[in-house]
Image (tube, rainbow, N blue to C red):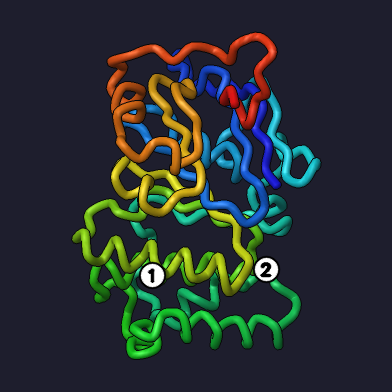
Amino acid sequence: MLEIDDIHVNYGRLQALRGVSLTVAEGEVVCLVGPNGAGKSTTLAAIAGGVTPHAGGIKLQGRGLIGMAPEAISRLGVSLVPEGRHVFASLTVAENLRIGGFQRRDRSGAAADFERILSHFPRLRERLQQPAGQLSGGEQQMLVIGRALMTKPRLVMVDEPSLGLAPLIVDQVYEILLSLRQSEGLTLLINEQSSKRVLKFADRIYVLRGGRIQLHDRASNLQDGKAIMEAYFGFGEHPAPAAGSVALGGVAR
């Protein structure tokens, strides 16, 4: 579904991404993990059109995204849940959700999706007329995910869903995301700092550090956590695929 090929992003003289390449197949849960400043949020922003790479390519089902406006990328089925739970605090929960569907022309479909989202997030139904600023952190995270779903996305990108939340609430958020993958056919690309959590929930994992991919593999191959920690903190170097090996999204197989 998504292919990122050797993208480079600068903020002035700061190199945020230095040749990042990754893939996401339809229906997958792929997680980006790495320390603060690794380039995880910049990667998601580049996909969503918030920043423009000065080199490399980004394709959604073969269609180039670089240079497209964020709203045009959204209409193709890409939705970003930003870090920090950006709700419209003075608006009600219902109004926040409906904002997510403002670009849609199928009003009956949007109304049906509104009801379906509330079935996934019953706590939001209980607070429909409450100002979003009065919700707890976990409820706000559910609201911004629900608002993203109102765009009828195919690819949902979630930036730091665990930020500032209690572990029990974070697990609930991830369980909801995984259930949505099953029921809605969503593809998920998640930026996460906790390597332990991504080992539990992801299909595949990319470790970013210093604007580069340091490691990529299936979560099932990384369960002891050692390789992730080495890549995360820079304890070890991970060599390029050997000659004659078959590459799977950048990893020798």
Relative side of 7 to 66, left or right: left
Q: Which label is found at residue 103?
A: 2
Q: Is residue 76 above or below residue 208?
A: below
CA neighbours of label 2 inside 10 A, class few (<14), some (14 to 19), many (20+): few
Estimate the x, y position of residue 172 in percent, counting from the top left.
32, 68
Q: Residue at x 43, y 17 (%)?
A: 14
Q: Amino acid at mark 1?
A: Met
Q: Position of residue 239 (x, y in %)?
A: 49, 11
Give the image location of residue 41, x and y in percent: 44, 38
The circle drawn on residue 142 is 1
Q: Amino acid at mark 2?
A: Gln
Q: Nearer the viewer, residue 110 or 62?
A: 62
Q: Compared with residue 173, is residue 207 higher up or lower down, i.e. above or below? A: above
**What's the residue at 64%, 69% (across, down)?**
152
Direction from residue 93 to residue 55 in the image, left or right? right
Looking at the picture, how far across and down is residue 227, in whole percent?
35, 26
Which residue is most to the left?
166
In the rendered picture of this protein, how many numbered marks are placed on residues? 2
Q: Residue at x 68, y 58 (%)?
A: 77
- 221 is higher (above) or lower (below) than 160: above
